[in-house]
Amino acid sequence: MIDIILNKGKEKAVLHRHPWVFSGAIANVKGKPANGDIVRLINAKGDFMAYGFYNDQSRVAVRLLEWDEEVIVDEQWFRDKVAVAVAARSELLSSGSTNTCRLIFSESDYLPGLIVDKYADHLAVQVLTSGMEKMMPVIIDELKRLLNPKSVFDKSDASSRQHEGMETENVVLCGDNPPDSVEVKENNIIYNINIAEGQKSGFYCDQRDNREIVAAYAKGKTMLDCFSYTGGFTLNALHNGATAVTSVDSSALAIETLKENIKLNKLDAKKHTAIQSDVNKQLRVFKDEGATFDIIVLDPPKYAPSRSALDRASRAYKDLNRLAMLLLNKGGLLATYSCSGAMNMETFKQVLAWAALDAGKQVQFIYQFCQPEDHPVRSSFPEGEYLKGLLCRVF
């Protein structure tokens, strides 16, 4: 096994079990490992520190797997990690009210670069590191053994794979092509999702708990669901007695699927309005029309993919939330989210304070949202905590 030697003084993060070693922390590579090979990480004195995947095309040159030198990182090691992750979700799925969740969450489940989402009897997989790419035959075989899925579909994100020098192919890894419409259940709400054509892995499981929390306020209220996608917040609000819900999304496929989901759940379509439009543009249209709402949900895409984009993203978040605050009835609720890992809660609160100031509004933070249990945050990897949100009362 090839040794990767750390620069002197770069041991602290490794000793704290952080799974990333950046290229700038490496003093020397003894040999020529191929990208994706498992290597030994040693300190400047020659002491063993950890095993990990190597990739010389990534800023994260080594993704650490195992800190015990006596443990053999072989096929069985990966099978065991997959089995532990799947078992950890069993209680979430045991009641039958939900049959969709994230089964494996990359570094947080000790499998860097592997994301697996379960959609009823189908799985969607994202493979984002060259090391995990090499292990996929083993991973797929173990998933088949544990779950016997009807299909496993590759939904790997192109931009992330480029950082590792990999190309992207959305292909079937196991079984048949997933059908155009897969019916899943989340908190007893039914969704038709399109795994192959849908955003990310097909559906956003990470807002499962937050959808229920917001819906608890919706009875007898009007709601605007922005970036609604296939209707998670919309369906929960209608199910809980909202008098009217307006959903806005730029995707025609998402809007069409949302309408189908309303029929699927036997909800009153007369209480729902779907608008295919850019959200920022539509918020300005609502303002010009004098439209107001009791509850507004803002669940935008990732504005800050890296720390370098944080300033620009903060301005975008501020403007978006300012526009929403202007549309709320006095004392109305704003449920606003950021899925940007670079945006921490403290910064997000500050952005909302700026938005309130510009809108001439007073804002109370009454609840903090986070990601659910199937998106765990590893204690040594705080970067896994990407989803945050605030429920705000706006005056």
Image: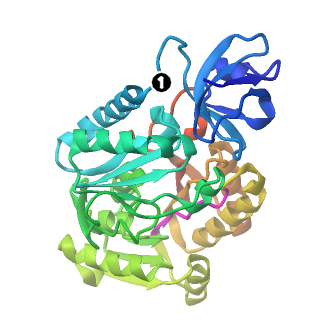
Q: Camera-side residue: 283 or 191?
A: 191
Q: Camera-side residue: 124 or 263?
A: 124
Residue at 47 percent of width and 79 percent of height: 251
| Mark 1 element type | loop
Name the side, left or right, on which 345 lies relative to 177: right
Name the side, left or right, on which 321 lies relative to 332: right
**What segment is highlighted magenta in the picture?**
294-304
For this orientation, the residue located farthest to the front is: 31
The coloring applied to the image is rainbow
Q: Does residue 241 appear in this view?
A: no
Name the side, left or right, on which 166 lies relative to 297: right
| Residue marked by disc 1 | 73
- Residue 28, x across and y down, in percent: 79, 27
- Residue 73, x across and y down, in percent: 47, 24
- Residue 248, x across and y down, in percent: 47, 77
> Is 335 above or below relative to 31?
below
Residue at 65 percent of width and 13 percent of height: 48
Circle 1: residue type = Val
> Is 148 above or below relative to 10?
below
Q: Is residue 79 magenta?
A: no
Q: Camera-side residue: 230 or 144?
A: 144
How crowded is the residue under tag 1: few (<14 C-alpha within 10 Å), some, or many (20+)?
some
- Residue 57, x across and y down, in percent: 71, 47
> Is 247 above or below relative to 17?
below
Q: Camera-side residue: 178 or 89?
A: 178
Classify the position of the C terminus by image quarter.
Answer: bottom right
Q: Is residue 300 magenta?
A: yes
Classify the position of the N terminus by image quarter.
Answer: top right
Q: Does residue 383 appear in this view?
A: yes
